Amino acid sequence: MEVGQKEITVLYTASDVSGIYYVIGEAYYEGSFVTAKTSTIYVKIPELVEFPRYGIESGASWKFVGQTVFHSNNNYVQPTTKEHLTKLIPYIVGEYAKDNGGDSNFIVRMTDASLPWGGMFWIGYTSSEDLIIYDRVDGYGNPYTITYWANIHHRIYATPHKTHRDGRNIDISCYSDDGSGGIYSSKCLKIEQIDRAISNYNAKFGDTFSYIYEGDHYHLTCKAASNYYYLGD
């Protein structure tokens, strides 16, 4: 700094964890503290919207579940994702019905999208020490604190998601919902059915969705939405 300088510029690289961050600058003169200033930075994916937990589109129904005590608002997406996902659901149910005697009573069960402000969905926890995360943000823009107690959560807390950060990724269960948020294990959505549904949808609306099979669910990516993290995929 120069004598008389009153402003400085700080380059801040946003964290993968959404929330409210504080940058504190302290000024000293000849080794003595003079003053300090705190700037507040809000780190978020812009304009994420809530995907309805329950709904019906063209006769096809869905349930959005998977919320936990720590992540009660797990159903946020980009507006483009919301638009296309809503229209994709009848395609999924229709392809299931084709292979099951016309049975369209398949409730598409979604388990995770993104948090209200985006960012790292799971932080991960393997330490033997307690972990406190400040200033996560709920669906109304209010900050809150999460405490992970070492003797309770270290065996059950999930490892970090690579995606689910920017409102364009959704997990869809391989099984129908039972109507109460649980799994209807007798109704299974097979790979060829989700593949036909997405292929037919993309043929009509452009290269909109891709998916990955992950054992008990399909991880969908809305390619038409903005990709804030992984420009190469």
Image (cartoon, rainbow, N blue to C red):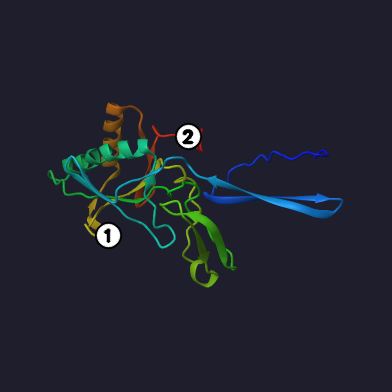
Residue drawn at x 20%, y 49% is 106
Q: Quadrant of residue 87?
A: top left
Label 2 crowding class (10 Å Cα cut-off): few <14, some 14-19, many 20+?
Answer: few
- Residue denoted by label 1: 182
Q: Nearer the viewer, residue 143 or 17?
A: 143
Q: Are marks 2 and 1 in contact (CB under 8 Å)?
A: no
Q: Nearer the viewer, residue 105 or 187?
A: 105
Q: Which mark sits nearer the N-terminus, 2 or 1? A: 1
Residue type at numbered disc 2: Asp
Residue drawn at x 24%, y 60% is 180
- Disc on res. 5: none
Q: Position of residue 215 (x, y in %)?
A: 37, 51
The furthest residue to the bottom? 151
Q: Position of residue 178 (x, y in %)?
A: 22, 57
Q: Position of residue 114 (x, y in %)?
A: 42, 48
- Disc on res. 233: 2
Q: Look at the image and tell me in which quarter the N terminus lies.
A: top right
The furthest residue to the front? 4
Residue 64 shown left or right of residue 38 in the figure = left
